[in-house]
Image: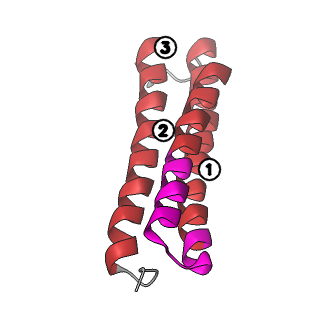
Amino acid sequence: MVVLALLNLAVGIVATAVVAVDTRRRGLSPRAQAGWIGIVATISIGGSLAVALGDDVLFRLWITRSDPAIAVTPLQLLTGVVVAGVALSALAVLTYGIGSRYGPLTAG
């Protein structure tokens, strides 16, 4: 579980770094840079950590077999965590890409 949390954290940090580099390259105002970097960091890093914590709870339920409705293997559960973390980071970067060009924090 710790490895997955660290993997998702690394993906979130890379996504945040990509946005930070792009905001500087495009010459956005410092306010817009801070806003977009903060939004992407919150969504990708915070969301990835929340997914990892939620996965830990589900994994503990699976190990103790306290809920027979959970019918996934540990590999499926771990794969779901990685996919959710990467999807959140991709969504955050996509939000930046669209919002920084057409939203309230544009370059113009």
Kindly identify the amino acid type of the residue bearing the numbered disc 1.
Gly
Q: Which mark is residue 19?
A: none
Q: Which mark is residue 85?
A: 2
Considering only order in the chain, which callout, 2 or 1, is on the residue closer to the N terminus? 1
Residue at mark 3: 74
Q: Is residue 106 magenta?
A: no
Look at the image and tell me in which quarter the N terminus lies: top right
Considering only order in the chain, which callout, 3 or 2, is on the residue closer to the N terminus? 3
Instruction: Describe the element under mark 2 as helix, strand or loop.
Output: helix
Kindly identify the amino acid type of the residue bearing the numbered disc 3.
Pro
The residue lying toward the viewer, choosing from 14 and 7, is: 14
**Residue drawn at x 32%, y 79% as measured from the top left:** 102
Residue 90 percent location from the top left of the image:
39, 47
Residue 13 percent location from the top left of the image:
59, 43
Residue 5 percent location from the top left of the image:
62, 30
Q: Which mark is residue 46?
A: 1
The magenta segment is 15-34
Label 3: how many Cα within 10 Å (few below 14, some 14–19, many 20+): few
